[in-house]
Amino acid sequence: MDVPLVLTHFLDRAVSLYGDKIGVISEGRSFTYRELNERVNQLSHGLSALGGKKGTVSLI
């Protein structure tokens, strides 16, 4: 099955198939795919609230 490797599609698919399974382990903390998706959405909405748009690049 060919599935495009678009980050948002990839993450949505991972959540639907493996939502409660560990998706990331970093610095002794682990996150399920569902938790990772929630954190990604929080970051995305926070950046949007600060004026960030698709394609925006910052060197700071």
Image (cartoon, grey):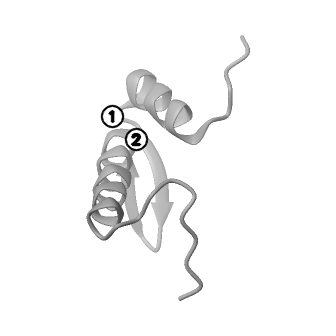
In the image, which is nearer the foreground, mark 2 or mark 1? 2
Dot 2 falls on a residue whose secondary structure is helix
- Determine which quarter of the picture holds residue 39: bottom left
Q: Position of residue 16 (x, y in %)?
A: 39, 23
Question: Disc 2 marks which residue?
Answer: 33
Where residue 15 appears, x then y in whole percent? 40, 31
- Residue flagged by tag 1: what amino acid is it? Asp
Disc 1: which residue: 20
User: Residue visible at 34% across and 67% down?
Assistant: 51
Can you name the residue that lies furthest to the bottom here? 60
Q: Splitting the image into 4 quarters, where does residue 43 fall?
A: bottom left
Q: CA distance from mark 2 to mark 1?
A: 6 Å
Q: Picture quarter containing residue 49? A: bottom left
Quarter of the figure that contains the N terminus: top right
Amino acid type indicated by mark 2: Tyr
- The answer to whether 33 appears left or right of 4 in the picture is left
User: How far across and down, in percent of the image, does residue 20 sit?
Assistant: 33, 34
At a point 54% along the width and 65% down the height, the residue shown is: 56
Residue situated furthest top in the rendering:
1
Which residue is depicted at the point 44% across and 22% down? Answer: 17
> Which of the marked residues, 2 or 1, is nearer the chain's N terminus?
1
